[in-house]
Image (spheres, rainbow, N blue to C red):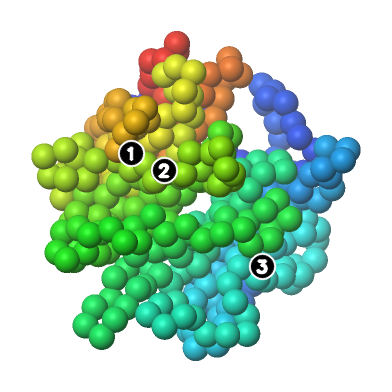
Amino acid sequence: MSSIYSICLLTLVLNLNLYQLTNAFNLETRLPVIKYGPKNSYFGYSVAEHLIVDENTRHISEAVMLVGAPRAQSGQPQTNHSGVVFKCPLNTIRSDCTQIRIEEDNKPPDEGISKDDQWLGVTVKSQGPGGYVMACAHRYILKGSDFQWGQGICYSLSQYLDFRRAWEPCYNRPVSKAHEQFGYCQAGTSGEITEDYDIVIGAPGPYTWRGTVFSNSVRYRIRDDKTWYLGPVLENESPVDKYSYLGMSVTSGKFFDGSTSYAGGAPRANGTGQVVFFSKHKGESTFDVSHILSGEQFASSYGYSMTSLDCNGDGRIDLVVGAPFYYSRSEGGAVYLYINSNGKFTK
């Protein structure tokens, strides 16, 4: 276990410049940037750094923080605590964050939709400098006279934080068996946008909370693949059992070869928690399962959170996995760092 504590320090560095990987750095604790949001809004539940790039010079024109407040009042008519995503300048003013207008301001939701307590801002991610932004509401509901389906929804925004489109990966999928199918997807519990312009959405709810991972092309250009890809969910095909919560976290990277793999955390799989890797197979909308990592302690929720990055500067994408309920006599919680060595992980 000692190796898991020798990890890269993943710290949000608020700076207007891009940095190259260095061996060490100091953290300035005397002058922190502190921002406040609405009371009881869960402001800060999710945070992402975002860089807006001038399209002519390709220089950074603005650096901001995107902050999710999933219990905030959005101001949309006939909604209650639907959630807000804020844009915060990187300065020392504590109360200058402004609401990003993702949804309609002046009219209520369409009939058959409930946004009350939908938790917009539960997930907020930036693709990177000059890239897309995504924000999700995993408790977004489609309803009728005799049903309410917790489908979940995500939105993509331009680098300037203008609305682009909504993403509902579970829409029009089978719901006749409710939670045993796609009735309670909870899509958007996690998500990210890859460097290949894929939007990746974690949905821990399908098929009795086995869960799955979806992906599609975020650009949606004429020549882009518009297929919804997803991990296998049927009982005899899914890599995990019921109540595994696959999709509680997601990440991606070129881990094993030159193509992008998608990883989903399943914190209750196998008793310990697991991370499942998926890859696309030409002509198929269902991902192939390419690899599975397992936690080492029962009920440690291995896979509850994770990220991918080149931690040691060798040009290969490494993996970091959280297990928040890992326990030993002297310490609680664990973070696992997997170094990518020619397509194989070493812990």
Above or below 7: residue 109: below
Nearer to me, 84 or 235: 235
Marks 1/3: CA–CA distance? 33 Å
Which sits earlier in the primary sequence, circle 1 or circle 3? 3
Above or below 144: residue 226: above
User: Is there CB contact under 8 Å for labels 2 and 3?
Assistant: no
x, y (%) of residue 201? 42, 49
Whether residue 191 is visible to the viewer of this picture, yes or no, is: yes
The residue that mark 2 highlights is 227
Marks 1/2: CA–CA distance? 7 Å
The residue that mark 3 highlights is 100
The numbered mark at residue 285 is: 1
User: Is there CB contact under 8 Å for labels 1 and 2?
Assistant: yes
Residue at the (84%, 45%) spot, across then down:
54
Badge 2: how crowded within 10 Å, few (<14), some, or many (20+)?
Answer: few
* Local secondary structure at mark 1: loop
x, y (%) of residue 141? 36, 73
Q: Give the label, 2 or 3, closer to the camera.
A: 2
Disc 3 residue type (three-letter): Ile
* Local secondary structure at mark 2: loop
* Local secondary structure at mark 3: loop
User: Is there CB contact under 8 Å for labels 1 and 3?
Assistant: no
Disc 2 residue type (three-letter): Thr
Nearer to me, 166 or 13: 166
Q: Give the label, 1 or 3, closer to the camera.
A: 1
Q: Is residue 197 left or right of residue 95?
A: left
x, y (%) of residue 327? 29, 43
> Within the image, what quadrant is residue 309 found in?
top right
Q: Residue furthest bottom?
A: 78
Badge 3: how crowded within 10 Å, few (<14), some, or many (20+)?
Answer: some
Nearer to me, 269 or 11: 269
Residue at the (25%, 55%) spot, across then down:
206
